[in-house]
Image (cartoon, rainbow, N blue to C red):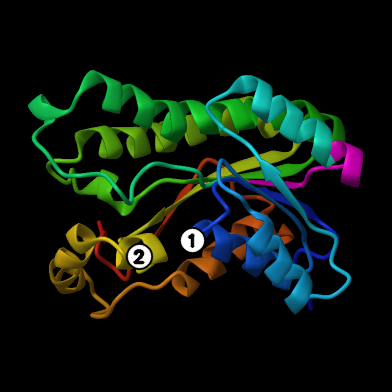
Amino acid sequence: MFKLKDKVAVVTGGAQGIGAEYSMAMAEQGAHVVVTDVLDCSSVVDKIKEKFPGMDTLALKVDVSEELDTKKMVEKVMGRFGRMDILVNNAAIFGKLKPKPFEEIAESEWDQLMAVNVKGPWLCAKAVSPVMRKQGSGKIINIASGTIFKGSPNLLHYVSSKGAILAMTRSLSRELGNDGICVNTIAPGLTMSENVVDSDRQLNHQDANIASRALKRHQIPEDIMGALIFLASNDSNFITGQCLVVDGGSVNN
């Protein structure tokens, strides 16, 4: 049974890493996936078409921090599919961040991160909401991080941005609920995506992360996909404004 059969799903930051995994997972469940990123997404779309022949999918270059880009994204999706059922706000700056005391974070670095990690999801939600309101349905899935519950040091800009995502989710769920739109958050733990594997800094934290978990192993992208499909599907139609932590029990209170 395909839980997302013929749904149209947009994934931001889908060119690589966990975003690419989200795109593949939803295609596997029957969704027509629109993969967006500032990077070239064509290889992800090619993989979807190869693995799921006949699946209608689309690659778009989108800078989520630019409102015009997000509006054009919606126009192109509607022109191709005529509807938009799911938005996964995944685009974020993280993998290449260098930990530092908050006093040493440059204003320009703070602003760039907030533009992508916070302004981006707001602009994307703002762009898709008229379509979803008209449909009387829709799922917006924001991606936060388990780190917001721990207050991880030396990444104040990143942790703050993901805390904002949780607050945004709760407010958006109130504003969009009357139109049948569900807004929820997934908060993953540190996941062995390609960006993390390529980062010595992230790998150095793996032992501590594993030790903090009830389930003592690495977290891999596949661990998050069940939560994603659940929140994107009709199984979660009466759930909104919530945060689902997927981290092997590291955050358990």
- Please check the rendered image and state whether residue 76 is part of the magenta-colored stretch, yes or no: no
Which one is earlier in the sequence, the residue at label 1 or at label 2? 1
Kind of residue sitting beneath label 2: Thr
Q: What is the spatial separation of the Cα atoms under label 1 and label 2, in whole angstroms?
A: 8 Å
- Please check the rendered image and state whether residue 85 is part of the magenta-colored stretch, yes or no: yes
Q: Nearer the viewer, residue 72 or 237?
A: 72
Q: Nearer the viewer, residue 192 or 7?
A: 192
Give the vertical position of 193 relative to 123 (above or below).
below
At mark 1, the secondary structure is: helix
Q: Which residue is mark 1?
A: 18
Residue displayed at 27% across by 78% down: 215
Residue displayed at 77% across by 47% down: 85
Give the vertical position of 51 relative to 229 (above or below).
below
Kind of residue sitting beneath label 1: Ile
Magenta highlight range: 78-87
Q: Decide if residue 143 is on the left or right side of residue 108.
A: right
Give the vertical position of 105 relative to 79 (above or below).
above
Q: Residue 231's quadrant in the figure? A: bottom right
Q: Can you give x and y, in whole percent of width and height, for residue 233 in the image? A: 70, 60
Q: Can you give x and y, in whole percent of width and height, for residue 212 in the image? A: 17, 68
Q: Which residue is mark 2?
A: 191
Q: Can you give x and y, in whole percent of width and height, for residue 131 in the image? A: 81, 31
Whether pointer 1 and pointer 2 mark residues with C-beta atoms closer than 8 Å, the reply is: yes
Whether residue 235 is visible here, answered yes or no, is no
Q: Nearer the viewer, residue 170 or 122?
A: 122
Give the vertical position of 130 relative to 155 (above or below).
above
